[in-house]
Amino acid sequence: MRRTSPGRHLLARSATTLVAAAAAIGFFTPVTATATTIDGYSATVQSDAVASLAAEAGMSESAAVTWLRTQAASVETLHQVTASLGARAADGYLDAAAKPVVNVLDQAAADQVVAAGAQARLVKHSSAALASAQEALQALPAVTHTSIGLDPKTNQVVLTVADAAKGTEALLKAAGALGDRVRVERVAGEMHTAIYNGEAITGGGTRCSVGFNTNRGGQNYIVDAGHCTRAVSQWNVGPSQGSSFPTNDYGLIRNTTGSAPGAVTLWNGSTQRISSAGTATVGQRISKSGSTTHLTSGSVQRTNVTVNYAEGSVYQLIQTNALVNPGDSGGCLFAGSVGLGITSGKGGGSSYFQPVGEALSAYGVTLN
């Protein structure tokens, strides 16, 4: 597996133009709410998300709109119910109808889930049992081009092994010894970091993408990918101020352009306002903006994923099937107006994102 590698310096724009193009509220055209609009989604994001969901699920566009309108309430219910159950819940996800499903260990917990308006699913393995299995695999020497993450839909930890992985014998033996708590999947290619997302930023011959515009104490900052800010000290939008990579994949850039609106470029002259940060949920439909692949949509496949890049392991990532490619690193993962993550890398047809909430907390910044 690899993180998306830096793109070469392809564009020569002023710093102000770059950031303004990435998130200028002036380009945003409000959409009047109707029965067919989705709260928090700009017209472009809604169109892309609906078309993607309709194509993947084989449903009509009107059914896709209903699905996406249901999603926000379902995510909130899922988080509330799992939090109230504590150790009696073993995570959860959104099903094919965008309804919340909570994994539970006993019938009493199932009854509580149903009373709260969610679906209950009795499973074999507790969150603690799965966490123990994941920790056992992660305690072994890291094998590049592999990942380890939680799949609540099957109540398992998934060990993904890419074709490029070498010396996997001990890892696979350990996975086998953990029984049905672990499933092994093999994928083509490699896993690598993916410098891209949002409008392009450049420095030292490298190209990444703007992540989220934030502020602290009156100063504007860009929260971006740590492998970007570790590689480049001075960008065309300002200097790098911090980097946490590997282990995490977030970094900070001091935005000196004077332009830092809280919105994401959609590559057609419009933007999507980002008004809050949230936690990704398996089954949730998401969007991604990056300077290589532009606006793409997909769904969350797994959470709490460890990806073993050549540069080192990164933990607790979000795995999706949204398209990313080299140069997209640092860009934004979001669901409507809710920011979720920062583009980290790709591998085996999946893309990986650093949860944005952790980065905001680490640097003490808030979304613009």
Image (cartoon, grey):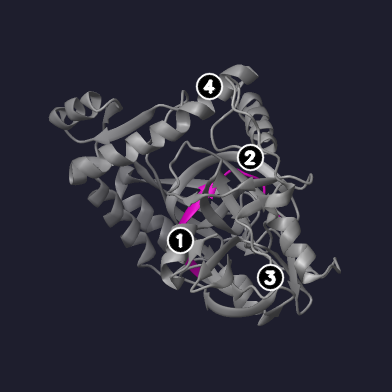
Q: Which of marks 2 and 4 is nearer the N terminus?
A: 4
Q: Is residue 64 magenta?
A: no
**Residue designated by label 4:** 66
Disc 1 to disc 2, how far (Cα)?
A: 36 Å
Q: Is residue 345 above or below residue 215?
A: above
Residue 249 - label: none
Q: Does the magenta stretch include residue 322?
A: yes
> How packed is label 4: few (under 14 Cα within 10 Å), some, or many (20 or more)?
some
Disc 1 to disc 4, how far (Cα)?
A: 47 Å
Q: Can residue 324 be seen in this view?
A: no
**Residue designated by label 3:** 258
Instruction: Identify which residue, 232 or 179, lies in the foreground.
Output: 232
**Residue designated by label 2:** 297
Disc 3 to disc 2, how far (Cα)?
A: 30 Å
**Residue designated by label 1:** 169
What's the magenta region? 313-325
Left or right, residue 329 beside residue 14:
left
Kindly indicate whether the residue at mark 2 contacts the one at mark 3 (C-beta within 8 angstroms): no
User: Residue flagged by tag 4: what amino acid is it?
Assistant: Thr
**Label 2 SS:** strand
User: Residue flagged by tag 1: what amino acid is it?
Assistant: Glu
